[in-house]
Image: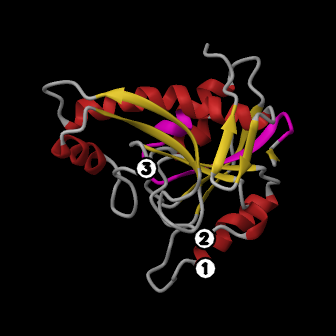
Amino acid sequence: MNLMSKTSLRIAVLISGGGTTLHNLLQFQSQVDCCFETTLVISSSPNAGGMAFAKDANIPCHIVKKEKNDAGELFSETIFSLCRQHDIQLVVMGGFLKHLMIPDDFADRVINIHPSLIPAFSGQGFYGDRVHQAVLDYGCKVSGCTVHFVDNQFDHGPIISQQTVDVVEGDDAQQLQKRIFAQECHLYPRVVQAFALGDVKREGRWVWITLPDSK
């Protein structure tokens, strides 16, 4: 099936921290031929620095905290209720560290980017420098980033697109992270643009995507 065949795609960005991915998407969005618009930001933390980017861009920003006694149902429903209220067509996770349960009406409408080549070095507990250190400890020659659909398991949904990055002799986790993040900044907004242009098709776990030309 073809996915998201509308232009001027309304997206929500979910954050938990500094909002570097949100900032990158907003920069891409400023291009004349961008076909998506960030119309909602949701943070899982009241201290997330990324909320400043939303404020500067006059984007509605909501804080949704996961309470200790919540198994996830209320947290997830609150987030997706906000998305429905704002007529969100695609939910884009940007450094969002909380587990979500995806309701049926948002199936194939939630995506995430992970800083490794899924299925390697992915799943619960693999985030931030933990991922890159694990890559180095294993002696991998390449790593990279993966954009994937989100389902109800950590880093499990079908892969949409991947970009490889060479591991260089002498790398530490921070150096590898920096080069991978540069590729994330290049890949992620182009994937969102492809959704807006209707250039994403999924059948089972197979996803075909036509990425727009690089700028």
Query: Per the image, is 22 magenta?
Result: yes
Please state the horizontal and vertical placement of residue 95, each as a whole percent of the image: 46, 48
Rendering coords of residue 117 (x, y %): 41, 42
Instruction: Looking at the picture, tell me which residue is in the foreground, 174 or 29.
Output: 174
Name the residue carrying label 3: 17
Question: Which corner quadrant of the image does residue 195 belong to?
Answer: top right
Residue 172 colored magenta?
Answer: no
Asked whether the beta carbons under mark 1 and mark 3 sit within 8 Å of each other, the answer is: no
Q: Residue furthest right?
A: 6
Quick one: label 1, few (<14), some, or many (20+) residues within 10 Å? Answer: few
Report the span colored magenta.
5-23
Q: Position of residue 155 (x, y in %)?
A: 48, 57
Disc 1 residue type? Glu
Disc nearer the start of the sequence (1/3): 3
Q: Nearer the viewer, residue 142 or 61?
A: 142
Instruction: Please state the total of marks drawn on the protein image.
Output: 3
Is label 3 in contact with label 2 (beta carbons under 8 Å)? no
Label of residue 101 in the image: 2
Give yes or no for contact between labels 1 and 2 (Cβ–Cβ under 8 Å).
yes
